[in-house]
Amino acid sequence: MLSVEEYRDLVLAGIESLHPIELPLSEVDGCLLAQDVAAPWPLPSFDNSSMDGYAVLQADIAGASAENPVTLKVIDDVPAGFRSLETLVSGTAIRIMTGAPTPDGTQCVVPVEMTDGGTENVVVSASVDFGGYVRKMGEDILIGEIVLRKGALLNARSIALLAAVGQARVLVIPRPRVAVMSTGTELVEPGTPLAHGLISDSNSFMLVAAANSAGALAYRATPVQDDEEELERALNDQVHRADILITTGGVSMGAYDPVKAVFQKLGSAEFYKVAMQPGMPQGCGSLGDPGIPVITLPGNPVSAYVSFEVFVRPALRKLRGLDPVSDRSKKVELAVSMTSPEHKCQFARGRFIDADHVEPVGAGQGSHVMGGLAQAECFIVIPAGVATVDAGAVVEVIDIREGR
């Protein structure tokens, strides 16, 4: 029987980062940047107003106040996207909107709130320092400056920066395409009336959602019955559509499970027992030629989800060009005592009492108890070789709250 760490190493040994491809900005959220990006122009690319107001010479309004206002002649009106052909001279002002280029001669902008808002003449009732409310060309980013380095994980903020410097397409390591397939003759689609002995397929929906939250582009294949020919057709259909295949079910010692036979026929999958609870039966390898990675998970829903967090998430991170080890683990204090199978690493469902304390959750830790899984915020990790953990002990937890 393999340890959790030994099996994780086996899974990751069969995973390589995806090759970089060029994608439009609309498709790079969550991707790893595969090139340095330099600014072809400065930001801002021209001097512009940071406020709706009036471009003026600073000397004209230096002493302005509510008790001693200054009146200036308005000689032009400049909305954003346009520029004035007029040049400011003493005694004049140009009405200007936020983002509009500042006219020649501008020394500062008086916000409209400091004026009477006039259109032919404007009364200024406060002073502004030299350069006030003017965004200077290049004050954010200089021309030629590297704005994002290779290896940056792209998000809404960095994508906005790429757009601002004119990058319509960039070279990235793409989000992996993940095919998720449940197996088992007992499975039916949600919404189907359940005859005796049948169950509604939940694993595939769970794993698609989990893979998407882990930065993949996952899709669900139709559940496959325990029939070797049907399973072989279904698997062959995924070889050219996915970067990795995740299956659930059919990896235990059951007499009617065809998954092992078909994977060994079509690829190089091997099956193992891992010293963990839940999730002992596992399998990994490749499918097809040259082959895509395959990870086969147990059919019990809690086992499948625990296995996703412990084995699949690191594999997806490696495909994305990231460090397989994420920052979802932390040390906290256990609020109550717990027991654990001594020869296995237990991943018990838990919830945070506060930032530094956890407790078990749900009606037991069975691999079928989905109510507890839905309530869980973390997995409490009790390592192999430990049979009891006292209240107050410091334990490792894996934070499974979304968005973390």
Image (cartoon, helix red, strand yellow):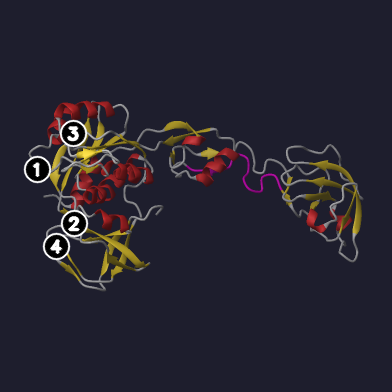
Task: Name the chief secondary structure element in magenta.
Answer: loop
Q: Is residue 305 above or below residue 69?
A: above
Tell me which amino acid carries mark 4. Answer: Gly
Q: Does the residue at mark 2 contact the one at mark 1 (Cβ under 8 Å)?
A: no
**Residue that mark 3 sits on:** 225
**Secondary element at tag 3:** loop
**Secondary element at tag 1:** loop
**Residue that mark 2 sits on:** 366
Tell me which amino acid carries mark 3. Answer: Gln
Residue 65, position as x, y percentages in the image:
86, 64
Residue closer to the observer: 398 or 151: 398
Horizontal side, residue 181 vs residue 144: left or right: left
Residue closer to the observer: 160 or 256: 256
Q: Which residues are magenta?
A: 136-149
**Secondary element at tag 2:** loop
Horizontal side, residue 208 vs residue 154: left or right: left
**Residue that mark 1 sits on:** 253
Q: Does the residue at mark 3 contact the one at mark 1 (Cβ under 8 Å)?
A: no
Residue closer to the observer: 156 or 41: 156
Marks 3 and 1: which is nearer the front?
Answer: 3
Question: Which badge, 4 or 2, is on the more N-terminal residue?
Answer: 2
The CA distance from mark 2 to mark 1 is: 19 Å
Q: Quadrant of the C terminus?
A: bottom left
Q: Give the number of the disc on residue 385.
A: 4
